[in-house]
C-alpha cells in the first residue's frame, strides 16, 4: 500500500508572508519590473535595429569607403585606380604590395546653404547628392524620391528636428525646391559633416537627394568624391583595415602620377557617419546589461538583509522546526522562495512590457538621434534569457550564500536566539555624550550592515546623477564659452591658393590673415586621430603665442584640448604620421594654447613651409573676424565658424537634454525606493525596542528623533561623500569614453550641480521619512510584552 506524501506546510506560509508585507514586495516588484522592462526593451530594440542596419549594407549598397580628389578623374585614372595596383616610376622596381582591385562609383556632392523656413536667412548646410542606383542608396521613409529638377528628398531625422514636412518648399542656396520625401541614406546613419567631427549635427546639417537636373541648378563647388566596393569583400574588420591600407597606397600612387591630389580618404571602418549609431547602440546594450546586474545585486543584498533579520526574529520557530525533523534544505528553500518568486514574476512582467511598451520608447529615442532605415521587430530569445535568467540567478546566489550561512547554527542555538558568530564580553564604551546622542550612536553600530548597503546604493545613484546633472552643465559651459574657444570667427580653407587663371587669391578684407593648414595622424591603440596642424604668422593677430619668433624648427605649441586628452606636457615629444604618404614627423612641445577647442598644433608659417615642403607663396586660407565677400565660393573648400564648435553641444542638448531631466527624476525615485527598503528593515529590526520606549513614556516624535535621526546622519554623510566620489567616477568614465572619439571636451560640473546632486538624494530621503514616521506611530506598546521570553 503506497503512502501518501505529506505536503510541506511551509508552502502555505508563502502567500501569507506576501500579504503580510505586501507594500515592501510591491515596491521591489515595481522597481524590478521597470528596470528589467527598460533593459529588455533596449535589448529587443537594439537587436532589431542592428539587424536592420546589417541587412541594409547589401540592400542599400553601402560603400566600403570613399575618397575625394581635387579634380575630377578621367576614365584612364578611374581604370588605373580600380586595378588596385601601385604606380611605380619607370626607373623603380615594381612594388611588392598586393593588388586590391575595386569598383569605383561617382558619388559627387555639393555643400549648399539651407533655408528650410524660406525666410531668407541661412539655417545650416545641406549636402546634396544626385539620385543614383548603384551605390549608397537611401531608404524612403515617407513621400517619394525626387522626380524633376524642382524636387528634393531630405534626411528624415533632420526634417523632424527642424519641423520640415513632405510638401514644404525650402531654399537651397537661394533656389526653391519642393520636399518630395524623407529619406535615410545608408552611409549617413548619423549626420557627421566631417569624419573628424566628435558629434553629428542633425540640426544645422542635412543630406539630400535631387535629380541630375536639380544638381545642375546649384552653383557651389562640386566635391569629386568616389565611393568604392572591393571585388573581394573583407571577412572581418582586420582584413578590411589591411585592404584599406593596400588600396590607399595604390590609389595615392595612381592619383599623384596623374597630377591630381587626394583631398580626403575615409574607409568604411573609420567613417563615423556609418559606424557611430551602431557602435553606440551596441555600447548602450552592454551598459544596460551592466546597469541591470548592479541594480539586481543591490536589491539582492537588501533581500538578504531582510531575510537575515527575519531568521533572527523567527529563530525560536526555526529551532522548533529543526528539532521536529525539518532539514536545513527545506528551511533554506523556504526562505529563498520569496526573493526568487518576486524576481521571476517581475522578470516575466518586465519582459512583456519590454517587448511592447519599452521597446517603442527605446526605438523613439534612437530615431530622435539617428537617421535609420525602417526596421522590423525581431523576437530575440537571448534578450529574455539575459533579463530573466540572469536576475533570477543573481538573486538566488546572493541570498543562498546568506541563508546557508545563517542556517549553520544548531537547533539549540536557534531556540536560545544565540546567532552571533562573535561573542562580545562587554558592551562598547561610548563617549560621555547625552543619553539621546549615545542611543543614536548605538543604533548606528547595530545597523552597520544595513547602512553599508545604503552607502553603496547612494553611491551608485550618485554616479548616475553625475551624468544626469553633469552633462547639461558641461554642454552649458561650452555654449557660454564658445568665443574663448576660437582664435578667429572665420577660417576660410581654400581649394587652392590660386584661381583657375593661375592668379594668387587675395582679399581686400583688412581683418584677413593668411595661414597654412594640413592634417596628420596621431596613432594610438584605440584609433588613429586626425590632428590639424596650423602654420601662422609670428605676429598673428589671431593666434597669439609667446616667443613664436624664437621657436626652433621642431618646436610647436599644441591646443589645451590636445594636451588634456593625451596628458602631454611642455617638453614632451609628439609623433605624427602623414595621412597619404609614408612619412613621420616629430615635434617638441613648447607650450599650450587655450583658444582652440580642436586637437591642433601651431607653428610659425615659415617653419610650416619648410616642414611640409610648401612652395614659396603657397598658403591654405585666411583667418578673419569678419566675413570675406570678395573671394568666389567656388574657390573655397570649407569655412569653419562658431557653428563647428557649438554644433556638438546643440546636438547633444537636443538629443539628450530632456532625457537627462527624466533621468534626474528617476534617480530621485530610485534613491527613495532604496532608502525606503533599508530604513524599513532598521525599524522592523527595532520594533520591540521602539515598543518598549513607548511603554517608558516616550512619544512618537521623541522616538522618531532617536531612530530617524540616526539614519538621517548616515544618509547625509553618505550623500556628501557620494557626491564627491560620484563626480570623480563620472569624470574618469567620461575620459575613458571620449578617448575613442575624435576631438575632446572635458567634463564640467558647476557648484550648483553638486548642490543638485546632494539635494536630489535628500529629497528622496525626505519622502521616505514620512512613511517611516507613520510606521513608527503604528507600532503598538504591547509588542514588547508579547515578545518577552
Image (spheres, grey):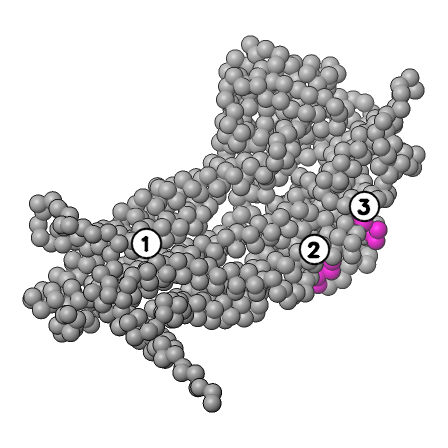
Residue 26 locus on image (x, y percent): 38, 71
Residue 762 locus on image (x, y percent): 30, 54
10 Å neighbourhood of mark 2: few (<14), some, or many (≥20)?
many
- In the picture provided, is 298 more to the left or to the right than 623? left
Residue 568 locus on image (x, y percent): 52, 24
Q: Are circles 3 and 1 on residues that touch, CB within 8 Å?
A: no
Q: Secondary structure at mark 3?
A: loop
Q: Quadrant of residue 436?
A: bottom left
The tag on residue 454 is: 1
Question: Which quarter of the rendered picture does the C terminus lie within?
Answer: bottom left
User: Which residue is found at the position 39% from the left and 58% from the top?
Assistant: 401
- In the picture provided, is 635 more to the left or to the right than 462? right
- In the picture provided, is 442 more to the left or to the right than 149? left
115 up-or-down from 574: above or below: below
User: In 3D space, how far apart are the residues under numbered discs 2 and 1 (Cα atoms)?
Assistant: 42 Å
Of the two numbered discs 2 and 3 on the same chain, state the one appearing first in sequence: 2
Q: How many marks?
A: 3
Q: Nearer the viewer, residue 410 or 497?
A: 410
Q: Nearer the viewer, residue 668 or 400?
A: 400
- In the picture provided, is 534 more to the left or to the right than 387? right
Residue 724 locus on image (x, y percent): 35, 41
Amino acid at each position: 500500500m503506497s503512502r501518501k506524501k505529506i505536503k510541506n506546510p511551509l508552502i502555505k506560509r508563502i502567500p501569507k508572508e506576501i500579504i503580510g508585507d505586501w507594500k515592501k514586495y510591491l515596491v521591489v516588484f515595481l522597481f524590478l519590473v521597470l528596470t528589467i522592462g527598460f533593459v529588455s526593451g533596449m535589448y529587443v530594440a537594439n537587436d532589431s535595429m542592428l539587424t536592420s542596419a546589417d541587412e541594409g549594407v547589401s540592400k542599400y549598397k553601402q560603400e566600403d569607403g570613399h575618397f575625394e580628389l581635387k579634380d575630377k578623374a578621367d576614365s584612364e585614372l578611374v581604370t588605373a585606380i580600380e586595378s588596385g595596383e601601385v604606380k611605380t616610376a619607370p626607373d623603380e622596381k615594381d612594388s611588392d604590395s598586393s593588388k586590391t582591385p575595386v569598383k569605383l562609383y561617382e558619388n559627387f556632392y555639393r555643400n549648399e546653404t539651407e533655408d528650410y523656413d524660406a525666410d531668407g536667412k541661412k539655417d545650416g548646410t545641406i549636402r546634396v547628392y544626385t539620385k543614383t542606383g548603384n551605390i549608397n542608396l537611401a531608404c524612403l521613409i515617407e513621400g517619394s524620391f525626387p522626380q524633376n529638377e524642382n524636387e528634393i528628398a531630405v534626411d528624415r531625422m533632420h526634417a523632424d528636428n527642424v519641423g520640415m514636412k513632405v510638401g514644404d518648399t525650402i531654399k537651397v542656396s537661394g533656389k526653391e525646391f519642393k520636399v518630395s520625401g524623407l529619406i535615410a541614406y545608408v552611409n549617413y546613419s548619423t549626420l557627421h559633416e566631417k569624419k573628424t567631427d566628435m558629434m553629428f549635427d542633425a540640426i544645422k546639417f542635412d543630406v539630400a537627394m535631387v535629380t541630375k537636373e536639380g544638381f545642375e541648378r546649384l552653383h557651389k563647388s562640386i566635391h569629386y568624391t568616389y565611393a568604392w566596393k572591393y571585388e573581394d569583400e573583407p571577412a572581418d574588420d582586420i582584413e578590411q583595415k589591411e585592404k584599406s591600407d593596400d588600396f590607399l597606397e595604390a590609389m595615392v600612387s595612381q592619383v599623384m602620377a596623374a597630377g591630381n591630389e587626394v583631398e580626403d580618404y575615409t574607409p568604411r571602418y573609420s567613417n563615423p557617419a556609418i559606424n557611430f549609431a551602431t557602435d553606440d547602440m551596441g555600447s548602450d546594450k552592454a551598459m544596460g546589461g551592466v546597469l541591470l546586474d548592479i541594480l539586481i545585486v543591490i536589491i539582492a543584498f537588501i533581500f538578504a538583509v531582510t531575510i537575515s533579520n527575519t531568521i533572527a526574529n523567527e529563530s525560536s520557530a526555526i529551532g522548533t522546526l529543526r528539532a521536529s525533523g525539518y532539514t536545513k534544505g527545506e528551511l533554506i528553500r523556504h526562505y529563498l522562495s520569496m526573493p526568487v518568486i518576486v524576481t521571476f514574476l517581475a522578470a516575466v512582467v518586465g519582459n512583456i512590457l519590454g517587448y511592447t511598451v519599452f521597446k517603442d520608447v527605446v526605438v523613439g529615442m534612437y530615431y530622435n538621434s539617428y537617421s535609420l532605415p525602417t526596421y522590423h521587430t525581431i523576437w530575440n530569445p537571448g534578450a529574455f534569457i539575459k533579463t530573466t535568467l540572469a536576475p533570477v540567478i543573481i538573486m538566488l546566489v546572493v541570498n543562498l550564500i546568506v541563508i546557508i550561512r545563517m542556517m549553520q547554527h544548531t537547533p539549540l542555538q536557534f531556540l536560545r536566539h544565540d546567532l552571533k558568530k562573535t561573542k562580545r564580553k562587554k558592551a562598547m564604551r561610548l563617549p560621555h555624550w547625552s543619553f539621546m546622542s549615545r542611543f543614536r550612536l548605538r543604533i548606528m553600530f547595530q545597523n552597520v550592515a544595513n547602512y553599508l548597503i545604503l552607502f553603496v546604493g547612494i553611491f551608485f545613484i550618485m554616479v548616475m546623477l553625475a551624468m544626469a546633472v553633469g552633462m547639461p552643465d558641461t554642454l552649458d559651459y561650452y555654449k557660454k564659452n564658445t568665443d574663448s574657444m576660437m582664435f578667429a570667427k572665420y577660417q576660410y580653407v581654400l581649394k587652392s591658393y590660386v584661381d583657375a587663371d593661375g592668379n594668387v587669391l587675395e582679399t581686400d578684407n583688412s581683418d584677413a590673415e593668411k595661414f597654412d593648414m594640413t592634417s596628420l595622424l596621431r596613432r594610438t591603440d584605440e584609433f588613429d586621430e586626425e590632428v590639424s596642424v596650423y602654420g601662422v604668422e609670428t605676429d598673428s593677430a589671431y593666434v597669439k603665442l609667446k616667443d613664436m619668433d624664437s621657436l626652433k624648427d621642431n618646436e610647436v605649441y599644441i591646443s589645451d584640448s590636445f594636451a588634456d586628452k593625451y596628458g602631454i606636457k611642455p617638453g614632451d615629444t609628439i609623433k605624427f604620421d602623414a595621412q597619404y604618404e609614408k612619412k613621420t614627423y616629430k615635434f617638441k612641445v613648447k607650450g599650450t594654447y587655450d583658444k582652440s577647442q580642436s586637437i591642433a598644433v601651431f607653428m610659425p608659417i615659415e617653419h610650416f613651409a619648410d616642414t611640409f615642403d610648401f612652395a614659396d607663396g603657397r598658403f591654405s586660407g585666411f583667418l578673419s573676424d569678419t566675413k570675406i565677400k570678395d573671394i568666389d565660393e567656388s574657390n573655397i573648400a570649407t569655412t569653419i565658424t562658431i557653428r563647428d564648435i557649438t554644433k556638438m553641444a546643440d546636438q547633444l542638448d537636443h538629443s539628450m537634454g530632456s532625457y537627462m531631466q527624466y533621468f534626474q527624476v528617476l534617480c530621485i525615485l530610485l534613491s527613495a525606493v532604496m532608502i525606503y527598503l533599508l530604513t524599513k528593515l532598521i525599524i522592523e529590526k527595532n520594533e520591540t525596542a521602539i515598543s518598549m520606549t513607548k511603554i517608558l513614556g516616550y512619544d512618537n516624535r521623541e522616538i522618531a528623533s532617536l531612530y530617524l535621526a540616526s539614519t538621517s546622519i548616515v544618509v547625509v554623510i553618505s550623500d556628501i561623500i557620494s557626491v564627491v566620489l560620484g563626480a570623480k567616477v563620472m569624470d574618469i568614465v567620461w575620459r575613458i569614453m571620449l578617448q575613442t572619439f575624435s576631438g575632446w571636451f572635458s567634463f564640467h560640473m558647476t557648484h550648483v550641480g553638486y548642490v543638485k546632486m546632494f539635494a536630489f538624494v535628500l529629497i528622496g530621503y525626505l519622502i521616505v521619512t514620512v512613511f517611516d514616521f507613520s510606521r513608527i506611530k503604528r507600532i503598538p506598546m504591547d509588542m514588547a510584552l508579547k515578545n518577552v521570553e
